[in-house]
């Protein structure tokens, strides 16, 4: 199946000038730009090579939006897990502080009892 530059641009969702740029890269000296009403038809092999070049140079965010969506979800989950861990650590820290306060109160009570008994 042979395609024109316009067909290739539609297939890879890009503009025709970008296709001409890649055609020049792929074909080198054999490249001829279409003139008039007779567009040049390109073989499937050339079309695939152009497609590979486009995919190689297209940023991953444009090429694979699902990748970034999944990564965003994964990072959000990780963020939530870290927040839960921070809350748990804060709770443990508060518990330790309360236990230390209770120990100090008991120690103070024992000292008070000891001083009252000695008086």
Image: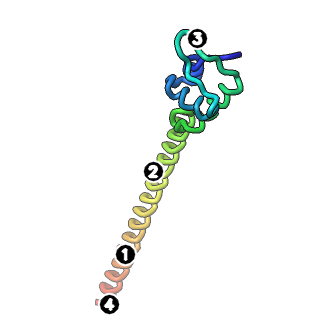
Residue on which disc 2 sits: 83
Residue on which disc 3 sits: 38
Where disc 3 sits, the SS reads: loop
Residue extending furthest front? Answer: 29
Where disc 1 sits, the SS reads: helix
Rounded to the nearest angstrom, the CA distance separating label 3 from label 4 is 115 Å
Mark 4, Cα crowd under 10 Å, few <14 / some 14-19 / many 20+, is few
Rounded to the nearest angstrom, the CA distance separating label 3 from label 2 is 63 Å
Which sits earlier in the primary sequence, circle 3 or circle 1?
3
Where does the image place residue 84, in percent across and percent down from the top left?
47, 50
Where does the image place residue 94, in percent across and percent down from the top left?
40, 62
Where disc 4 sits, the SS reads: helix
Q: Nearer the viewer, mark 3 or mark 4?
A: 3
Which sits earlier in the primary sequence, circle 4 or circle 2?
2
Quarter assignment of residue 28: top right
Question: Does the CB distance between marks 3 and 4 fall below 8 Å?
Answer: no
Please tell me which residue is depicted at 56% across the width and 18% down the height of the picture: 34
Residue on which disc 4 sits: 118
Please tell me which residue is depicted at 34% across the width and 81% down the height of the picture: 113
């Amino acid at each position: 199946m042979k395609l024109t530059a316009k067909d290739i641009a539609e297939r890879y969702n890009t503009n025709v000038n970008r296709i001409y740029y890649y055609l020049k890269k792929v074909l080198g000296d054999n490249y001829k730009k279409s003139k008039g009403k007779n567009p040049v038809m390109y073989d499937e092999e050339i079309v695939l090579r152009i497609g590979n070049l486009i995919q190689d140079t297209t940023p991953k965010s444009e090429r694979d939006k699902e990748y970034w969506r999944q990564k965003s979800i994964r990072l959000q989950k990780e963020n939530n897990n870290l927040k839960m861990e921070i809350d748990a650590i804060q709770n443990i820290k508060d518990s330790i502080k309360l236990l230390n306060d209770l120990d100090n109160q008991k120690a103070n009570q024992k000292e008070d009892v000891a001083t009252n008994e000695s008086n």
